[in-house]
Image (cartoon, rainbow, N blue to C red):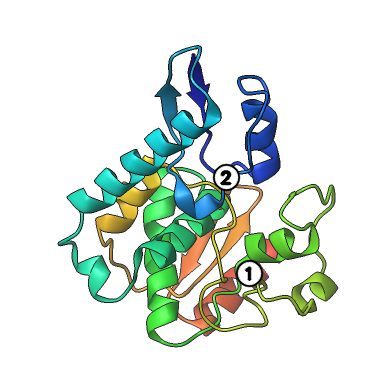
Amino acid sequence: NKITIVEGWSQNQLDEELSKFFNDFESIPYSEIIADTYFIQSNSNFSTFINKLKIIKKNYFNDYKNNKLFDEYNKNEIMIIGSLLEKEGLDEEDKKQISSVIFNRLDRKMKLQIDATVLFAITNGKYNLNRKLLRSDLKINHPFNTYIYNGLPPEPISYVGKKTLDILFENNKNDFLFYFFNYSLNKHIFSKSFKEHKEKLYEYRKK
C-alpha cells in the first residue's frame, strides 16, 4: 500500500486517510512523523506503520545533528517552525523568506503574529473557519495565538514535510521582519521595517 501524508495536513485529514488502510489506529501527533509518501505491506498493522515512520524521522534528524540550527532550537521547536511554514508559505522560495522572518523575529523577541496560529486556535486545529480572519480573532486568548503570546506555539500546528525541514536546515538569511499577502499578485510582500511595511500595505489597500 502507498500512504501519502501531505505536508500541512491537519490530524483530521490524516485520520481520514489512515481509516482507508487500518481498522484500528490512533491519531498521530504532528511532532512524531515527517509528512511524505510511504509504502507498507498490505497486511501490516498500524503499530508497524507508525514505528517505521518514527524511525525514518529519527534517522532524518540524525543526518542533521551537527547543523548549527541545533545551537538554538531543539527538534520539537524545529518541527513547530516547520509547521508554521507549511501553513504560511506558498512555495519553496516563499518558505525560505518566511523562515528567515520567523528566526529574525524570534531573535528580537518580537511576537510572530502568524495568522495560521490564530486559525488553528479558533478552529481547534480543524482549519474549517470558512471566512476571513477578523481583527477580533487576533485577540483570542489562546496559547497558540502568536499575536498574544511571545515565542513559538506549544506544539506544531500541522504535519511537516521533508522539503520544508530541508529549507529550515539551510539557515536562509534575510533582513525582513514583516510580510503580508497581496491577493492581486498572489504572493507575500516582505519588509525590513514597520514603516516600510505600513507604506506597502497602504499602497496595496489603495489599489
- Which amino acid does the dot numbered 2 rest on? Ile
Res. 75 image quadrant: bottom left
- On residue 201, which mark appears? 1
In this picture, residue 111 sits left or right of residue 184: left
Residue 7: percent from left, percent from top = 51, 40
**Residue shown at the point (50%, 12%) measured from the top left:** 42
Disc 1 residue type? Leu
Q: Secondary structure at mark 1?
A: helix
Q: Is residue 179 visible?
A: yes
- Image quarter for residue 163? top left
Identify the residue at horizontal 58%, vertical 47% (top origin): 185
Q: Quadrant of residue 10?
A: top right
Q: Position of residue 195 (x, y in %)?
A: 53, 84
Dots 1, 2 in contact, CB < 8 A: no
Q: Are there few (<14), some (14-19), or many (20+) residues within 10 Å of tag 2?
A: some
Task: In the rendered view, tell whether residue 74 sits above or below residue 160.
Answer: below
Along the polypeptide, which appears first: circle 1 or circle 2?
A: 2
Residue 137, image x and y in percent?
Answer: 81, 70
Q: Residue at x 82, y 51 (%)?
A: 129
